Amino acid sequence: MTIQVLIVEDDPMVAKFNRHYLEQIQGFEFAGWAASGDEAVQMLEELAVDLILLDFHMPRTSGLQLLSALREQGSMVDIIVISAASDNSSIRKALQLGAVDYLIKPFEFSRFQAALSAYREDYALMKHKENLSQEQLDKLLRHSLGTEEDKSGTLPKGLTEGTLESIWSIIHKLEQPVFSTEDITAAAPISRISVRKYLAFLTETGVLEMEISYGAVGRPVYMYTVAAEGQGIIAKYI
């Protein structure tokens, strides 16, 4: 299952960053970039798109106008709004027109990842289930309202509590507040691949915040910090 994503954003640099973020999350594929609402309409006639990452402020046809037009046409393509507009009116209109999430610029990668991960779960459920149980429907609604909480403390398959606890202990022992994957692997007999899996999990659950920086050769370096609420979240798992 691969979710095809169209990015609608007039700023090419922002579109590039959104694409880069998107490609870090499993299950999604970049289908194309439209720099305006009019261009998006043309591309949607040619591409099979499941999800649109939509900016509101664009020349000629705004993101809100595009979303409204798509719904008038009966299009059921899913929309995640990514916009600097934080006023109640814009947010309310987007939600009324069926946007599945709304990210206010600037946003952290962890928030972007959480939005895409929740959407991926909902997409898989709706794609493969003709009928939903009340529990499944409640989960969908909690995602839609942004109130989903993982209170089970259950780790994903392939992760263990012991290794997670070791990595969390190393993070606390590091002298610097900002650290990389290499900082963890240098302090523990754990493979780099394994460390990256655990850091990805900690980022997705909100324990860590991640930023991407670029070195002299242009390669992305992922730097992490412990989120303000990180200690409370990690307590569910170790």
Image (cartoon, rainbow, N blue to C red):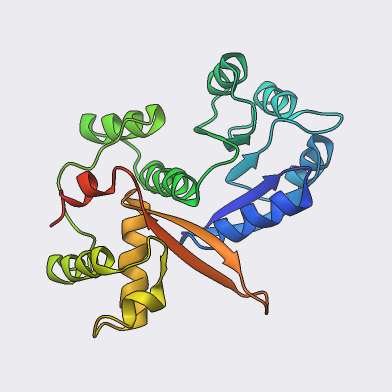
Which residue occupies the foreground of this view, 194 or 76? 194
Relative image position of residue 83 (x, y in whole percent): 64, 34
Relative image position of residue 66 (x, y in whole percent): 73, 29
Picture residue at 50% right of the left edge, 33% below the top:
101
Which residue occupies the foreground of this view, 111 or 127? 111
Relative image position of residue 112 (x, y in whole percent): 49, 47
Picture residue at 21% right of the left edge, 44% below the top:
232
Snapshot quadrant of residue 148: top left
Relative vertical location of residue 168 with respect to residue 34 in this rendering, above or below: below
Looking at the image, the residue that sits furthest to the front is 175
Relative vertical location of residue 222 with respect to residue 144 in this rendering, above or below: below
Relative image position of residue 221 (x, y in whole percent): 53, 70
Q: Is residue 14 shown left or right of residue 169?
A: right
Instruction: Count every numbered label the image shows and give the total.
Output: 0
Which residue occupies the foreground of this view, 117 or 216? 216
Picture residue at 78% right of the left edge, 52% below the top:
12
Looking at the image, the residue that sits furthest to the right is 60
Q: Is residue 228 shown left or right of residue 31?
A: left
Q: Which image quarter holds the C terminus?
A: bottom left
Picture residue at 47% right of the left edge, 47% below the top:
116
